[in-house]
Amino acid sequence: MDAIIRAMRAEDIADIYEIVSQPTFLYWTLALPYESFEAVKRWLEATSPRDLMLVAEVDGRVVGASALRPFLGRRSHAAEFWIGVREEHAGKGLGSQLLAAMIDTADNWLNLSRLEMTVFTDNERAIALYKKFGFEIEGAHKAATFRDGAFVDAYTMARLR
């Protein structure tokens, strides 16, 4: 599925709120259920000039979103990111399109040499996506977070160039 990948605009926040409030997004990320629209809006607006906030648009509707957030100071060569896609569009290549756009910007415009993220060890779809783009598992964290009534493990994955 080809999408238009573009910068997030203020009018996209309601669509992004829907994406980050989905049960699957909550299950696979550190997001908490029942976040208010205002809290998500503040989180999305709390960006620095180096942050890259993207959306995937299909037929005029935002169906995916991502953010690349570079670190500061001695870690300014590195960034973390997240990706979210509407459940009905999962598995159609939107995550790949968003990740490709973030990597292109990181490599060719921001001069970032390290991209990293934390992913639950049972999130096979996300791990496969990241490996496809050259990310490697750097370490495992036992009982990294609490999800759905139990502790779960997570990997740190990174791509160096």
Image (cartoon, grey):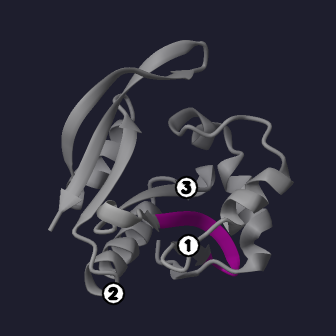
**Left or right of residue 70: residue 13:** right
Q: Which of these two is toward me, 34 or 79?
A: 79
Return the x and y of residue 42 as percentages of the image width and height.
76, 60
Residue labelled with disc 2: 109
The number of discs equals 3
Mark 2 vs mark 3: give the one in front.
2
The circle on residue 53 is 1
**Left or right of residue 90: residue 23:** right
Q: What residue type is labelled 2?
A: Trp
Secondary structure type for disc 1: strand
**Left or right of residue 65: residue 16:** right
Say if 71 sits above or below 51 in the image: above
Secondary structure type for disc 2: loop
Q: Which amino acid does label 3 sit on?
A: Gly
Give, as a single range, the part of the protein colored magenta: 58-68
Between the residue at mark 1 and the residue at mark 2, the CA separation in whole angstroms equals 14 Å
Residue depicted at 84% across the width and 47% down the height: 36
Residue labelled with disc 3: 84
Secondary structure type for disc 3: strand
Pointer 1 or 2: first along the chain? 1
**Left or right of residue 159: residue 44:** right
User: Are the residues flagged by discs 1 and 2 in contact, CB closer than 8 Å?
Assistant: no
Q: Could you classify mark 2 by the number of other residues whose Cα lies within 10 Å: few (under 14), some (14-19), or many (20 or more)? A: few
Return the x and y of residue 98 as percentages of the image width and height.
44, 69
